[in-house]
Image (spheres, rainbow, N blue to C red):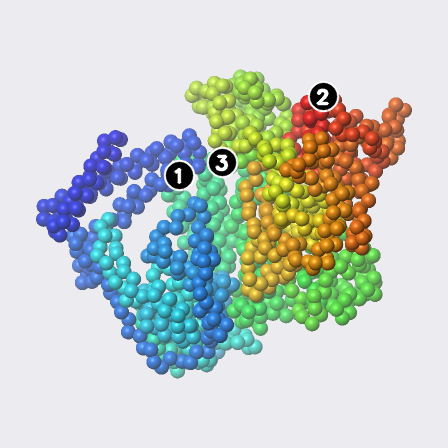
Amino acid sequence: MKSLFQQKEDLKKDILEIQLKESEQGFLSAEELWILKSKINELNSTLARLTTWWKQRAKIKWWKEGDCNSNFFHSYANARRNSNFINSIRGADGNMEEEPDRVEEVLMQFFKNKWQQRNCKLDGWLESNSYLDEEDRKWLNNDFTLLEVEKCYQIFRWFYCPRPISLCNTLYKIAAKVLFNRMAGIIPKLISREQAAFLSGRSLNDQVILAQEIFHKFRYSKSNKGLVSFKIDMEQAYDSMGWPALNKVLYYFRFPEKFCNLLMECVKNPKFSLLINGNRSPWIRAYSGFRQGCPLSPYLFILCSQLISSMFQINDSIGIQISPNGPKISHLLYADDIIIFSEAKLNMVKKIKGLVKKFCDWTGQKVNNEKSLILCGNSVKRRRKNEISKIMGFKLVKEFNYLGIKITLRRLKKSDFQFIIDKVLKMLSVWGSKFISLAGRIMLVKTVLLAYPTFYSTLSLIPKGLLYEIEKHCKNFIWNKNRGEYGIHYVNWNSLCDLVMYGGRGLKSCSKKIGPLRAKMAWKYNTDKDSLLYKFLFPKYGMLGDMKNGRKSTSSAWKIIKDGWKFLKPIVRWKISNGDSIDILQDTWIMDKSLNEWPTVLAMDDSMEGNRRVSSLISGDCWNLDELNKSFGKDLVEIIRNIKIHSCNSEDRLELINSCSRKTISAMAYAEICDDCDKDVYWSWIKEAKLNARVENFWWRLFKNAIPTFQLLSSRKLQSNVLCPRGCNEPENIEHVANRCKKLLEVFNCLNEWGFCIPVLDNMDYRCNWLKAQNTLLRKIYCNSVFITWKERNEGVHGKSEQTASFIASEAISLASVSSNLYLLSTGRLDVNQHMLLEKIWHPPPPGWIKINLDASLLRSNKGGTGGVIRDCKGRLLLAFGKPCIHWDIAHLELLSIEMIKDIIQDWMLEYKGVIIEGDNANIMKLIQDTLKKVAREEHVGGSLRRRLFYIRDLEGTLPSPRGKKIRRKPGHLRADCPNLKSQPTKEKSDDKAKYKKDKMKTQKAFWSDSASESSEEEVEEEVTNLCLMANDNLDQSDQDEGRTPNLSHLHVFGCKCFILNNGKHPLEKFDPKSDEGVFLGYSFVGKAYKIFNKRTLVVEESTHVVFDDSDKPSEYKIEDDEIEAIQGVEAMILGERVEPQEDLPREGRYRIALHRYRRSTG
């Protein structure tokens, strides 16, 4: 191999010398030219040999290191390089050219013709019916700011390189992106709804569905003249657009002159150079077209294409009606894809031809007659079809593809989608399965095979049999052996398609995901009243779910939308306005369920059973209590009364039940149909361990009893012996493989000798319960040990030698240490007075700031609550708050907890520099961050949320990765400077505030203590620097203005001695003590009780039967040695976080709070 590499370098050196000689002399002799060609061919041959060698190496590395190695795919790079080499090319005269200079000459001439100057007719244009208003012109003329430039280059992530790409360099792309952002909010006002490309809120799906509905009309129309459509193809649409036409279009829509000049500077006079077989050609100057890869090109192209839409809008006689009461539609546009619809009248056809010719004359475009097509309705006679074809010069067809979907006037058959099966089989034949592990095959099926038919199955009525055939090929690819040999299908297809949280592999079944994908279209149809789809389909079919207006139809478009509605309905609820659209029993309008699903009894009458509407329960803008009390119970009436009626004069609207989850509609719909699955109790901690892909896949198979143990093979009549092949004298099953195998026990002994405590357990349930309680490193070591031991067992079964137990143990540790970042040690924070374990899961705010930690909880009974705690930079608890409520969405409760902040902000918080809001729901934090960055006028929902958070002016968000292993969800952070808290008061109020603060400081001196103060060590010890006070201000504003201090007699120092009276518990036995000594840990706002650490039972209890011994000072208190571990286990009581258990610590004691004074006193 060294000779091959050296040969490659020598050949590259020789080729470079010849090319340099050519550049100096300007020519090469015939002999030198042949030498160059031979050297290049030899280099290609050498590269091909090296490619084969890398392929062979890739197979070995995949087998040894797993599917994370990508050299197998990278090995195709050299093959692509060879295939891209141009050996010969056909010239304009039809002759094949092989000489390098002739190849370059042919390509140069082609691109010069491609970018030649276009003749554009700039007179006779129609008057513009849409143009920029004065406000938009002023916005475009504003000076550019540094913030706009920063916004453009900040989109690059750390793993992206802002390199030159396509035909634009980096600086140009940033400048063009600044102009693009200026235009983004203005262009949709100028472009008609018929154009769906590149604009936010417009979708390719809408165009395809609407096209299918129009051709459904073609199929069944009984019009005398019939209907006709033209699919027009423009030659090199992007590259042939004339610059004079663009300049005229900008002034046509009344863009300001300054902005027009900037845009034209970006478009005009670019130069291009071609790399032809590794050699750079001379520069070619372009005189027309838009650059590929430029952010401005799509917007500028659709601006010019708007000319043809404007012509059809003025000539409103062209077009067809889908329904008698609906508007006319004349054309559909998606970038350069144009379809025109008309009645099959010759005068209409001639008018269309004239309009298309005008458009081409104005813009420099040219129609490609060979690729343009005509499709006529079934009622058009053959003679008329020929006449239309002769006038237009296009080809007559019975079907064609529009945006990838077949359009025809018949029912689609399985043969129409055979290309999908052919594509899947082609990919399978390329991949094979010999050198791809099971985990790799599952990943390829998930990301490629099952994803390929998604577009076609969503937008057309694809036969179910074809989807089942695709799934069959996927199953065979996963389980079968190479060369088509049949393998054991250990796990059925439905289990593979279960969500990962339910113990599956997360494959999306082709037939199962169609409905959820279509739910998005149903949602848009029902909510976007401005869309083209709603505009033309509503007059014919009405609203989805409205039985009064709905009608049956054989239209494939309407069947697709109705299918989406079936999957959309379970995930939406009604926002009540007038109540006319909402059925009391069938629709969801109370929380997240319809009344048919509520576990309650209703007083139903005949009117309610007959589709009674919610409007009958409304009187004016409020609920009719008399009607509610007739049908519903007291509790349900109270819930209904709390539902807001938005406006009785507007229509009811749909909203997503889990609108704050930040999931897509398709994801919510798919999760709904999978909701009836049972969760795998063991799979959650396997996913948290973040194992290697192959190790994780092995454990998944282990839990599914899908590994080829002798007992499993024997049950399938493939093995006669069921005993372990290592001589363990017991049946080999998954319990034996994971716990009792002799080789595995030897590995555990080695690990135990090295300091890893892995007990010997006989049962898989006991083992899994033990693993759930361990840290990530120990989980990985154990899982890797079982996996490698199983691999070595397979080596022994197939006649090879096994590795020693110590080797397996070391390999397990190595694999665990390199597979993820482990935080085994923590030095703590010297500037923060808190324990290292507490610092891992809670980071203090900067000095002078406070942090508000928020959370919410929700039960299946819809009972929930929100709450939070406020701490300073020392980790001391300042305030706690909570509120019970009834709700259905945990994400929405998290949002409500943030809104609660405005109710708990108090005057003493003015002393701090700012506030950090922290929650464990990253989706909600990201939602608020994104919402506050948007302009309120752009999105109604965003503006509403901004108003709800008016008390925080500026939120700057970061989403750091969690360091603590106890954080299961990625935390989100919001930083606020709280300007409303720091508003400038009048002089009189300032004096009152100062007086109030002075008195309050006297009472709560410890509350405001600072480690940087000049107090002596004894005074600091007496303060509550290392203790927490629950400051609960019970004075109103008048008391505070008079200088009165709050009564703190009901508060007790955390950690003080107390006694738990047992008279409030179950009946005492004869020898039970009447009270237990304990340590006070805090207050429970939910249970409205004290939290006490019981020194006798070593558990944390909540009780109201507590007597405090305030005479016992914490500094003099001593804790026994056997209680230190228990106190360490209850240190997170305030946080409410579970921590890793100690060896024999009861489960009830695994919490933490800061009790540093006790540690100092115990040494």
Say which quarter of the image contains residue 377.
bottom left
Q: Is residue 562 visible?
A: no
Residue at 47% of width from left, 46% of height from top? 447
Q: Return the disc, 3 or 1, that comes first in the chain's sequence.
A: 1
Residue extending furthest toward the right: 1070
Residue annotated with mark 1: 70
* In contact (CB < 8 Å): disc 3 and disc 1: no
Three-letter amino acid code at disc 1? Ser
Reply above or below: 166 against 790.
below
Three-letter amino acid code at disc 3? Ala
Give SS at disc 2: helix
Reply above or below: 1006 against 1094.
below
Reply above or below: 545 against 665.
below
Q: Return the disc, 2 or 3, that comes first in the chain's sequence.
A: 3
* In contact (CB < 8 Å): disc 2 and disc 3: no
Residues packed near mark 1 inside 10 Å, few (<14), some (14 to 19) or many (20 plus) = few
Residue annotated with mark 2: 1121
Residue at 39% of width from left, 48% of height from top? 161
- Residue 693 marker: 3
Q: Return the disc, 1 or 2, that comes first in the chain's sequence.
A: 1
Give SS at disc 1: loop
- Residue 942 marker: none
Task: Give whichever of 238, 884 is nearer the camera.
Answer: 884
Residues packed near mark 2 inside 10 Å, few (<14), some (14 to 19) or many (20 plus) = few
Q: CA distance from mark 1 to mark 2?
A: 55 Å
**Residue 530 locus on image (x, y percent):** 55, 69
Task: Give whichever of 329, 986 is nearer the camera.
Answer: 986
